[in-house]
Image (cartoon, grey):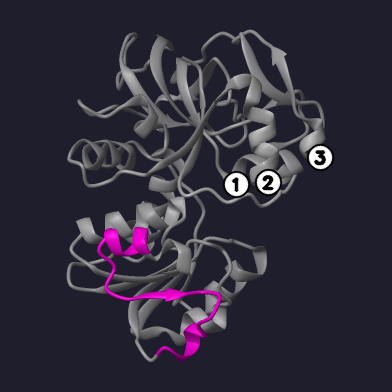
Amino acid sequence: MRRIEYDRYGGPEVMRLASFELPGLKPGEVAVDVRFAALNPVDWKVRRGDMKLVTGKRFPRAMGCDFSGVVLDVGAGVTRVKPGDAVFGLTNIKACGATAEAVIAPDTFLAKMAEGVSFEAAACLGTPGVTAWNGLVDKARLKAGQHVFINGCTGAVGEAAVQLARMLGAKVSGSCSAESFPRAQAMGLQDVYDYRSTDLARIGHRYDVVYDTAGTMRIAVGMSLLRKGGVFLDIDPQPLKFVRALFDRRLKPIIINARPDILDALAKASGDGILRLPVAETVPLFQAIPLLTALERGRKLPGKALVSFG
């Protein structure tokens, strides 16, 4: 089998296409024949060593977190899925390895795909959907009738957050580039602002929840947009932000935390047609490194990038 891996932390130049063998399954693990892997910024952040306090120093390491596929085998104690099931999910951040012909993941990081949902669509759900849920449901405890502002509303996490917020009965406004206004408006946002030309601190509206899904909003700006009792969700969890959050409960740094209940809810939402993320480009494995490199260097796509293993 083949995968994208690297022998040391570093830039795009450390990636290579290599052969590998799946290790034996431990209790609670599942082996999956990957059909599609979705690319996310966290993939190259891990490879650069931005999270090496968590990911450690064992090499070679494989790329990728999000995938869809068919279960090959299950370890002891696994009851959520069985061989032959079509599944989607994500890997443990310490292991990664989704950009591969097969991957091992904890069973708690997987869910069965809903009927009628394609492998392409399912591969997109993991990191964006879980991150959106962790913020809106786990941290903000969003309620019907509340008003949410999504900074970066047409990014993957942003689009997932918009759709989940509307599913929960909230009103949604947000910011994106002017070129992405049609996509934002098609999702049903009430007000959309161009982040390049608008001083968001001066727009005059106040919100129950502000979610910076782009990781570009200053805390002061996010706080200025809050109503009394509102919360600011920050997707860029730096250590000093956690310290500040101890003293200001309005600030909620987000760390992705996948759970079976979240993944099952995402599967249902996708099956109901409520949660769908657009796919902008799909490449075979041998073209994955150039695409990863381009995205890391700033190439923008109007949707998700996938690697196909069909």
Q: Residue 158's image quarter?
A: bottom left
Question: Between 212 and 181, which is closer to the camera in this rendering?
Answer: 181
Q: Which mark is residue 270?
A: none
**Tag 1: residue type?**
Pro
User: Badge 1 is on which residue?
Assistant: 41
Q: Which quadrant does the N terminus fall into?
A: top right
At which x and y percent is residue 61?
Answer: 71, 26
**In terms of sequence position, does the residue under pointer 3 or pointer 1 come before the other?**
3
Sequence-earlier tag: 3 or 2: 3
- 63 on left or right of 58: left
Task: Give the amino acid at mark 2.
Answer: Glu
Q: Kindly identify the residue that appears in the image at 32 percent across and 9 percent down.
A: 84
The residue positioned 81% from the left and 31% from the top of the image is 14
**Does dot 2 land on a helix, a strand or a loop?**
helix
Q: Residues within 10 Å of mark 2 (few under 14, many from 20)?
A: some
* Badge 3 amino acid: Gly
CB atoms at circles 3 and 2 under 8 Å apart? Answer: no
Query: Do the residues bearing badges 2 and 1 touch, measured as CB atoms within 8 Å?
Result: yes
Q: Position of residue 293 (x, y in %)?
A: 70, 39
Q: Residues within 10 Å of mark 3 (few under 14, many from 20)?
A: some
Q: Is residue 135 above or below residue 310?
A: below
Up-down relation of residue 234 to residue 132 (above or below): below
Which residues lie in the magenta part? Answer: 182-203
Give the numbered dot on residue 10: 3
Whether residue 15 can be seen here:
yes
